[in-house]
Amino acid sequence: MQDSYQEGFIPGPNETFEAFQNRVELIKSETSNPELLMSKLKIDFETITPITPHFFSITTKKGLPFWIGAMTYLYEDKGISIPILEFPQKKRGFFLSKEEVLAHEKVHILRSAFNSPRFEEILAYQTSPSPWRRLLSPLFQKSWESTLSIFAILLLPIFPLIPLSLLSLALLRLLRNQYLFKRAHTHLSLLYKNPNELLTLLTDQEIITKSLPPITSPRAHLFSLIAIKY
């Protein structure tokens, strides 16, 4: 279990030990030949770059929207989601190094078997060295929200109330989520030395209620392994 974690895999909320192992083996098998996998998934890639022994990043001819520094997609193969990271063809600034962007996206890759978007951006931004980015950058929970914000900004000169209202709602949601996340972080920090790493294993509901994974689940087993490591 801990070896799989070191390789970039954590069990999903509903996975059994057997299902987790099957997913790990399938992803390792499929990503051992990235070019073949890209052909199978019909992805028109430009370059492929390894980022871990079993995961890689790509650039594509279509590219990413200008406001996105990188994005992790989930591609379905044999009923299992395979995370693939896409970088833009040219380096984009936004005051972020490629190393920081990669650390952020690795959190999304780790949690690829989760469907818990409420705190995922907050968790991913915990890798940032900037306290302001950790606080304010998780404004959007899903990629379409950032796209919507771009169109809302275009309406600012004509209908200023629309983008200002959307921004206010997003900020209020973020402050609420940051409060709940901080509360769970404080709770775990009283018991363990590595709360951020342990929070990565939790679902949205577990973070809200400050509870731990079900005791018989693979996540609970991994949680205990990581906790006693420190």
Image (spheres, rainbow, N blue to C red):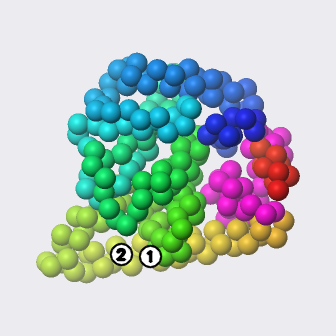
Amino acid bearing label 2: Leu
**Nearer to us in this view, 121 or 164:** 121
Residue at the (28%, 29%) spot, across then down: 44
Instruction: Work out whether 207 lies above or below 87.
Output: below
Crowd band around label 2 with a 10 angstrom C-alpha radius: few (<14), some (14–19), many (20+)? some
Q: CA distance from mark 2 to mark 1?
A: 6 Å
Quadrant placement of the C terminus: bottom right
Element under disc 2: helix
Please determine whether, in this image, residue 36 is positioned above or below residue 9. above
As displayed, is residue 151 above or below residue 156?
above
From the image, tell me which residue sits under label 1: 171
Whether residue 169 sits left or right of residue 60 in the image: it is right
Q: Which residue is mark 2?
A: 167
Is residue 220 something one can see in this rendering?
no
Q: Quarter of the image holding residue 94? A: bottom left
Q: Which residues are magenta?
A: 192-221
**Is 200 colored magenta in this rendering?**
yes
Q: Residue 22 in magenta? A: no
List x then y, in percent, for residue 223. 78, 49
Q: Is residue 5 visible?
A: yes
**Of the residues shown, which amino acid type is indicated by label 1?**
Leu
Q: Is residue 168 left or right of residue 135?
A: left
Quadrant showing the N terminus: top right
Q: Residues within 10 Å of mark 1 (few under 14, many from 20)?
A: some
| Residue 195 sits above or below residue 58 on the image | below
